[in-house]
Image (cartoon, rainbow, N blue to C red):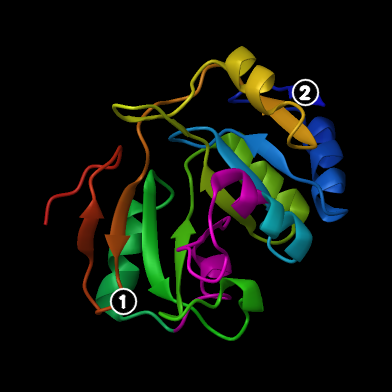
Amino acid sequence: MRINVHPDNPPRRKLEQVADIIRSGGTMIYPTDTVYALGCAIGQHKAVDKICRLRGLNPAKANLSIICNDLSQLSDYAAQLDNHVFRELKRLLPGPYTVILVGNKMLPKIFRNKKKTIGIRVPDNEVTSMLVDILGEPILTASLKWDDDDEIEYPTDIDDIYEHYGRDVDVIIDAGAGGNTPSTVLDATSGQLELIREGKGEWDS
């Protein structure tokens, strides 16, 4: 299924339709403030496994990430933050950053890797924000990408995305052309923010 929405003013009824699919264990491709991504509800283990298979990830070893709606929801799944880190995240989010944090016991078991860490995103994207709000829980997220011999590519054309993945997921949210630069990844597990990968988000250490 392909659902068209306006990127800045998505109809809530259409995203409610998507949320119903996700609640029932469906998988999706959806826009973020960086690139298009694969996603599902974090409580749907079979859907999480499917996303990992599509990306060639081992759930027990992969560094999985979730999308939260705000810092309050983030704190439901991460250990208590250092005051300095909290202030920095409040400054940066919502925005094109993935922050690696120590998870807590609220995280579903499938996310509890050996490092006990989780990647957290709060995108500056109206479609994503409304969808997480409607769903009432975070979304597992994995950047949509395909590899060639020379470099990793992030597909931007929604018709190409539909052609390649239309049969692999239950719903694709079409919000127009996507970006081709992934999020900036910051590690906050030490009590300080450390740059792991430079991406769309500006970072001055």
Q: Is residue 69 magenta?
A: yes
> Mark 1 highlights which residue?
189
> Mark 2 highlights which residue?
2
Q: Residue at x 25, y 74 (%)?
A: 84
Regarding mark 2 in the picture, which secondary structure is present there?
strand
Q: Give how far across and how far down residue 30 sits, in percent.
A: 63, 35
Q: Amino acid at mark 2?
A: Arg
Q: Residue at x 19, y 48 (%)?
A: 203
Q: Nearer the viewer, residue 160 or 76?
A: 160
Q: Give how far across and how far down residue 54 sits, in percent.
A: 62, 44
Q: Is residue 153 visible?
A: yes
* Residues in magenta, as a range: 51-79
198 vs 104: above or below: above
Please rate how many residues cluster around mark 1, counting C-alpha atoms within 10 Å: few if below 14, some from 14 to 19, many from 20: some
Which of the two labelled residues, at mark 1 and mark 2, occupies the earlier sequence position? 2
20 vs 200: above or below: below
Q: Give how far across and how far down residue 55 sits, in percent.
A: 55, 46
Which image quadrant for residue 99?
A: bottom left
- Which label belongs to residue 20? none
**Dot 1 and dot 2 residues touching (CB under 8 Å):** no
Residue 105 relative to residue 181: left or right: right
Which quadrant does the N terminus fall into? Answer: top right
In this rendering, the count of numbered labels is: 2
Q: Residue at x 38, y 43 (%)?
A: 96
Q: Amino acid at mark 1?
A: Thr
Q: Is residue 115 magenta?
A: no
Which image quadrant for residue 168?
A: top right
Residue 3 relative to residue 48: left or right: right
